[in-house]
Image (spheres, helix red, strand yellow):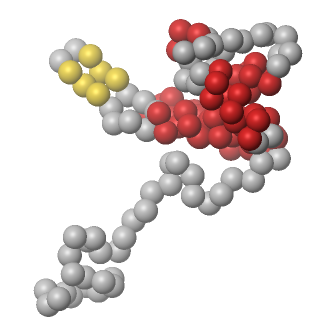
């Protein structure tokens, strides 16, 4: 994993890292190669937003608990979701309605024959 960060923000990789707060090599979420791909494919602003979206997906893993060890990503994910909205607004990037934190809910059980939201179901296919 390649990691570079120049506090002078003299290159696009450092600029993206600055915006997303990924400036510590010990806990970096993204490799330089990934950020380079994003800034060559998209604008720097879009690369920032897509990087934050990637971090949110990584923090959306289930919580882990084993004896005395407990790992919860909820607070970190919430912080990055807030950062995503702030950076999108700051950099003029329009977010789609479906973000990594969106959920899909169905008005009925997906594993049943029910195909509409009814209060009485007779069980017939």
Q: Position of residue 19 (x, y in %)?
A: 73, 27
Q: Is residue 106 visible?
A: yes
Q: Name the residue nearer the viewer: 21 or 120.
A: 21
Q: Quadrant of residue 106?
A: bottom left
Q: Name the residue nearer the viewer: 83 or 61.
A: 61
- Total residue callouts: 0
Residue at the image point whose x is 26% and y is 71% from the top: 109
Q: Where is residue 108 in the image (x, y as percent from the top left)?
A: 29, 75
Residue at the image point whose x is 80% and y is 24% from the top: 12
Q: Position of residue 37 (x, y in %)?
A: 68, 33
The reply, left or right, for residue 124 in relation to residue 12 is left
Q: Position of residue 123 (x, y in %)?
A: 13, 86
Q: In this view, does 9 lie above or below 93?
A: above
Residue at the image point whose x is 20% and y is 21% from the top: 66
Q: In this view, does 1 lie above or below 111?
A: above
The reply, left or right, for residue 110 in relation to residue 100 is left
In which quadrant will I find the C terminus?
A: bottom left
Q: Quadrant of residue 55?
A: top right
In which quadrant will I find the N terminus?
A: top right
């Amino acid at each position: 994993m390649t990691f570079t960060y120049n506090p002078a923000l003299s290159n696009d990789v450092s600029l993206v890292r600055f915006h997303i707060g990924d400036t510590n090599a010990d806990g970096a979420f993204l490799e330089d190669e990934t950020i380079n791909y994003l800034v060559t494919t998209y604008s720097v602003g879009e690369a920032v937003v897509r990087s934050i979206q990637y971090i949110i997906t990584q923090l959306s893993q289930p919580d882990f608990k084993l004896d005395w060890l407990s790992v919860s990503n909820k607070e970190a994910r919430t912080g990055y979701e807030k950062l995503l909205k702030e950076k999108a607004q700051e950099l003029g990037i329009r977010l789609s309605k479906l973000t990594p934190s969106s959920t899909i809910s169905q008005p009925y059980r997906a594993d049943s024959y029910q195909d509409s939201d009814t209060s009485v179901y007779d069980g017939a296919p």
